[in-house]
Image (tube, rainbow, N blue to C red):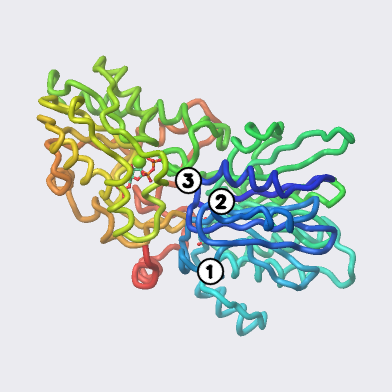
Amino acid sequence: MCGIVGIVSSEPVNQLVYDSLLLLQHRGQDSTGIATAERDIFHIIKAKGQVREAFRTRDMRSLLGTMGLGHVRYATKGNASSEQEAQPFYVNAPYGIILVHNGNLTNTRELTQELFHIDRRHLNTDSDTELLLNILAHELQSQVSGLDLEPDDVFSAVERVHERVEGSYATIAMIAGHGLLAFRDPFGIRPLTLGKRVLESGRDEWVVASESLVMESLGYEIVRDVRPGEAVFITMNGEMYSKQCAPDARLIPCSFEFVYLARPDSVLSGISVYEARLRLGNRLADTVAQWTPSGDIDVVMPIPDSSRPAAMQVAQKLGIEYREGFYKNRYVGRTFIMPGQAVRKKSVRQKLNAMSTEFKGKNVLIVDDSIVRGTTSKEIVDMARQAGANKVTFASAAPPVRFPHVYGINMPSRDELVAHNRKIPEIAAYMGADHLIYQEVADMEAAIIEGSAVTGLEMSCFTGNYVTGTVSPEYLSWVERTQNS
Ligand SMILES: O=P(O)(O)OC[C@H]1O[C@H](OP(=O)(O)OP(=O)(O)O)[C@H](O)[C@@H]1O
Ligand SMILES: NC(=O)CC[C@H](N)C(=O)O
Ligand SMILES: [Mg+2]
């Protein structure tokens, strides 16, 4: 679930791309990169770490041009700490293409073979994004014969990409001297939104980004989401073309975006993330009420940050006081998207502190948005106890995560998931909680899509049903053996 942005303007875009990446920082902390296009020359800067520490003033000065794109990475394939695998990726033919990707491809083994043996292309990293770029480049090369490039050539290449590539991919690419291409996989698993504003010169400035908060914060009008399977091509002169490039496209957006990944002030697939989290809280409150004897809870507490809206609603619906007993160090990033279990474990303690005045002698209901590896919840229950809590009930606004996520969230192996092969009382015992309550899958889905045009969600990590249909047990075992988390 990286963050991506692309901008086409008639004015310099370096600062706008940088500002957008800062707004998308919650989607990836491993590395970041910006590329700009000065007519047909690309300038690229990429580095490890977060946006604020990665780019220097001299880097920003070198990023000249009126078209640009950027990326914040949360690695799902390859090596999180590799600077080579930081995005964007560049390929020199045809034209010169530079690409950023949010998502994860699931037929990388087949594509690697095809690229080497048939397309005769060289890959220099383990990144699936480098694969995606080379497939796009190969298909574009097959479409065109001269120097001219028509939007229809680009769309035909994207049609072929959809035929060859499986998995999730929200993608933005710049084609040197021509324009900016954005496309989304046929299920629209990862988000991508289009916006624009009119410059003083009267020309349109276009933006494509992972989340709508980029448009809102930077003063763009939200035009619409890029549709599943659709490609949008914006020329360097600001003309916008679009085409549906997949025959059976249907929207099945990732449920985890609403549960945890996206910022609450974004609207994805027409659904306000904040309101979805409130509704998740409402439904969770009903489940809590069903399973908890009345009088068993004195206070409801969130685990900052992502569970706040849900916890607020649980408290309100149950008519129990809402208190914030955990104080968060704002200078520590998001724990779940850090690479490596040792770092994640240490970071929970660095990040959260329990205030004993809020816990002493109380029966607390602690609400989190999700429990994945149990890193946070186990530490939190321990901290609550040390702070003097009496009974600790733990509630998760998402159902148990029992299956690997293969569409852009780094949870590749079943064994690392605390709910894998454990019944709920066993998970509670592992966490040290007196009682553990999870949201039901149907409630989560209904809470998120209620009142919207979305008819279904990608929920494989909760259900084991993979929408792309090609995720076999053999593939999952291979991912488990080969991918670090
Ligand atoms: O069971 P786990 O493997 O610990 O994962 C789940 C936890 O990780 C996330 O928090 P994170 O600190 O990443 O971000 P937040 O500050 O936005 O809540 C999420 O909100 C849960 O608290
Ligand atoms: N989370 C993502 O979207 C990751 C993108 C890509 N698969 C990578 O690992 O770099
Ligand atoms: Mg959290």
> Which callout, 3 or 1, points at the residue further toward the start of the chain?
1
In which quadrant is the C terminus drawn?
A: bottom left
Residue drawn 60% across and 69% down? 130
Frontmost residue, 150 versus 209 = 209
> Which callout, 3 or 2, points at the residue further toward the start of the chain?
2
Q: Which residue is mark 3?
A: 254
Residue drawn 67% across and 35% down? 218
Q: Amino acid at mark 1?
A: Ser
Where's residue 191, x and y in %? Answer: 57, 45
Q: Amino acid at mark 2?
A: Val
User: Of discs 1 and 2, which sits in the foreground?
Assistant: 2
Disc 1 residue: CB within 8 Å of ligand 2: yes
Task: Name the disc covering residue 227, or none.
Answer: none
Where's residue 83, x and y in %? Answer: 54, 67
Whole-angstrom CA distance, mark 3 to mark 1, is 22 Å
Q: Which residue is mark 1?
A: 127
Where on the picture, by quarter, is residue 172? Answer: bottom right
Question: In what quadrant does ligand 1 lie?
Answer: top left
Q: Amino acid at mark 3?
A: Cys
Residue 397 visible: no
Frontmost residue, 196 versus 226 = 196
> Which callout, 1 or 2, points at the residue further toward the start of the chain?
2
User: Of discs 3 and 1, which sits in the foreground?
Assistant: 1
Residue 431 sits above or below residue 80 on the image: above
Q: Which residue is mark 2?
A: 51
Q: Residues within 10 Å of mark 2 (few under 14, many from 20)?
A: many
